[in-house]
Image: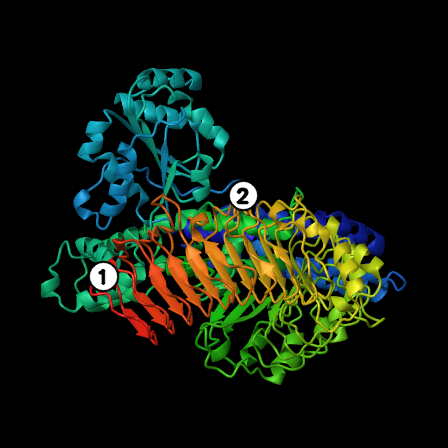
Amino acid sequence: MVWVETVVGALLSGFLQVLFDRMATRQFVDFFRKRFDGTDLLLLLERLKMILLTVNVVLSDAEEKQITNPFVKGWVDELKNVVYQAEDFLDEIATLALTECQASNNPVQNSNICETLQSRLHEIIKKLENIAQHKDVLGLKESFGGKLYPRLPTTSLVDECKVYGRNKNKNKIMDFLFSVRENGTEIPIIAIAGMAGVGKTTLAQLLYNDSRVKKHFRTRAWAYVSEEFDVFKVTKTIYESVTSRDCNITDLNLIQIRLKEELVGKKFLLVLDDVWNENFISWDFLQNSFKDGAKGSRIIVTTRSHSVASAMGASLTHSLQQLSYEDCWSVFETHAFRSINSQTHPKLKPIGEKIVKKCQGLPLAAKIIGSLLHSKVEAHEWDNILNSKIWDLRSDKSNILPSLSLSYYYLPSHLKQCFAYCSILPKGYVFERETLVMLWMAEGFLQQPRDKKCMEEVGNCYFDELISMSLFQKSGVKPGFVMHDLVNELAQFVSGEFCFHSESGELHGISEKTRHFSYARDKFDGFEALNEAKFLRTFLPLSLSSNPSGSNHICQFMVHTLLPSLSSLRALSLSGYKIITTCPDINKLKHLRFLDFSGTAITELPESTCSLYNLQTLKLLDCFQLVKLPAKMRNLIQLGYLHLNGTRSLKELPPEFGRLKNLQILTTFVVSNNTGASCISELGGLLRLRGKLSILELQNVQDIADAENAKLKDKQCIKELAFHWNNNGHDQETETVVLEKLHPHKNIENISIEGYNGTKLPDWLGNSLFDNMVILRISDCKNCSSFPPLGQLSSLQKLFILKCPELIGKLPDHFPSLELLYIDQCCKLDFPSDDIKDYRNLQVLQIKSSCDPLTKITLSFFNKLKHFKIQDCRNLNCIEIFNDHHQELKLLQHFEISNCDDLKAFSGGRMHSPNLTSFSFSNCNSLQSISMPEHMNTPKLTSFSVSNCNSLESFPKYEHTPKLKSFLVSNCKSLQSMPRNI
């Protein structure tokens, strides 16, 4: 179990690094020298640095000893607890610097503050010195590099009779190994990727030892790589594997030449097992020896990281998933019952079945736990394993689940902090990437970027790394991510008592050391015990079900008394609670960086919120009753993320909003005609905006210059823009010019225009420079009569034109990238019929109560069409398919025509739609015939409906409809016969 404690120790080293980095920043040093020059604080700060360095050099030894020595573990925990206090102290200094920056006319007074700070820092140093004194008593030795707990190297040998559930995986990769792939000169690589313990090496061994593989590849080599990608070592291993003899060569160039000579002209299979290094340069250097192999050669790589697969240029990445319960039980049974008979011990099997469920499909977990139990025949012994955390085993069982831990063992310190923090997420909890990244940022886990990346991008890189290492995985239930239960339990063990999650409402175990706290919001209301956790940094209620049964009420004591006393809070959420007011003393939470009131009933935020100078993220999503934001919000100089989606009662933003220079995410900007509020020109100062921005109440823009000064054209990182008017505006000319001035940057991808009262759409909308635009939505523009040449939007994939009754003109005859077209209530708009040139990618075509000029639609132009729906097209009289090709509408799944009174015929004689699932005509009183191919085959058709078609005389014939579930014919008065084969 040394590996686990190494993780814990590395976490502490990461915290110390945070302190060193904080004390080295220019802002911190300049403020300290300016405000406290000539005081003892500077000397105390140097003492703090020295004592931290003193304990840092023994951490590596402490990491290794704490698992077997509870006194060392206690020493590490006490050190970590005081390091947290030191970090709080330094953060207060940084906050003082921000406060003074905001109150330049009223600088911080030195005397009282200096005395208080000196006293606190002296106390922290005293605690650290006391802890440091015990390092010699505990026998901790100085070390400047952590010891690695080596993993046993893998070999190519495998006991096939003990492998279960991998035949499909094996066969898929076998197909790749034997396939003909001769494009280019590179040897095709297949990567077997998956979380630790899932059986990647075992699968590679099965392939390597298969008789067909041996016959196909006369030359084979197996090399165990591990975390250190040593090109010389790997090359030498491959050479010895190929030649089956030892090699004493010590020169890399010479060994590469010898290996190349051995492989030239030969068709070989090379397995590189357990690759961690993502450096493609090292890989390129290694493969120099392979390039002269014969065509048909293959390389198999096993890795925990999909990034490794990408770096190596894998032709195929095979993601290896967990075993089914049945296969996992087979693995467990093979090992657990190898010395005893399950029939003679009937009590053991039901316990074993529960243990296998905890293995969550990981064959290595099943194998090792089964091996632990093979000599135990008493039910209570099996119960002990079932109810114990497997990592609680002592060091003599240090081989327990090493493959489940290695990924964490080798994580860099900043990722270890992020991972350990995730222990506050309950098992099975589906979490969002964005929220978790914001929380990491609030806790200071994200390293300052050295390039032009913003902090959120850094956090997303961390998140992607944890996905790549299989510590996070996509949820199969709903959008978001989850942690495997074993991964979650490991996170809990790593974080220890510094993180606490309550799912049942119990708070047993919470203590002064607890820094991060989460709980099931709908099952918990007993907050009194939180008085123990006076240094709490995270307060996070979570909803564990889509329909929480609780009342979601929180006591006033918690909101107004307890929370303000938790002065170390960095992340606070009251999301989902039925609170109307917030704590007026929220400014006491001076460390706060993440604040979430989403889904609450608050009507306003207290003015004291504007003193939270460290605040980075403010979430107010779906605060339907929120009417205003605090007037001095401009003081939140660190605010980078402001989420206002769903704040429908908010009618204005506070003045000088453009001073929030760090703002990157602003979901909603509300334009007001109130002179005391921010006008749209304030957007001009927000140079870092990105993502999606909705601008509401645009009818309140009176000065055209304000629209131009919003400088949307300069905001190259905004990808989505939504323009909204409330339809009460009467100045059509002003609105027309305003929209013309709101010219976005050419990088825009998604534009929505709603409620616009101008007479024409802006000229820039059809500019060919917008070659990144993929979605355009024009809605409720009742006076608009013309639009620019949209056909120049070469990348447009989705086009919505809704409720524009005066819009005149014909849609372009070419939309090469368009996949979805939806037209609704645009009666004067025309749709091209015979003169279509390029709609090659159109998959969804829906026209409703629109296109009066349209008389005919020829479906032959839409070979990729999947969904076709026409409703209330009053002059449409013909729908036809006329081409001679037999490829028409092969992808079509849904076909629906309704309320088209002039439609006389559907000429589908060339229609070949094997994927058709539903076919419907209704309220088409002039429809006389439905023509289909004579031997039309519709094996997937489930629903056929024709109703209120009084002129229809006959049905098409269907040869093959095995899945038909619904056949409805009603009110077809002229129908003479029914198809016999239905």
Residue 422 visible (yes or no):
yes
Above or below residue 471? Residue 919 is below
- Near-viewer residue (697 or 304): 697
Q: Residue at x 36, y 24 (%)?
A: 236
In the picture as drawn, the residue positioned furthest to the left comes out as 344
| CA separation in Å, label 2 and label 1 | 76 Å
Where is residue 105 drawn, in percent x and y?
A: 90, 62
As drawn, the label of residue 962 is 1
Q: Earlier in the sequence, mark 2 or mark 1?
A: 2
Q: Residues within 10 Å of mark 2 (few under 14, many from 20)?
A: some
Give the structural element (helix, strand or loop) at label 1: loop
- Residue 69 visible from this viewpoint: no
Residue 352 location in percent, x, y? 22, 63
**Closer to the camera, 835 or 121?**
835
- The 10 Å Cα crowd at callout 1, few under 14, some 14 to 19, many 20 or more, is few
Nearest to the observer: residue 874 or residue 444: 874
Query: Mark 2: which amino acid?
Result: Glu
- The percent position of residue 384, horizontal first and vertical second, equals 28, 66
Q: Which residue is drawn at the image coordinates 39% and 46% (left, top)?
A: 883
Secondary structure of the residue carrying tag 2 is loop
- Position of 952 with respect to 727 (left or right) is left
Disc sitting over residue 142 in the figure: 2
**Amino acid type for the residue under numbered disc 1:** Pro
Total count of labels:
2
Q: Quadrant of the C terminus?
A: bottom left
Residue 371 has which mark? none
Q: Nearer the viewer, residue 954 or 625?
A: 954
Residue at 38% across, 25% down: 235
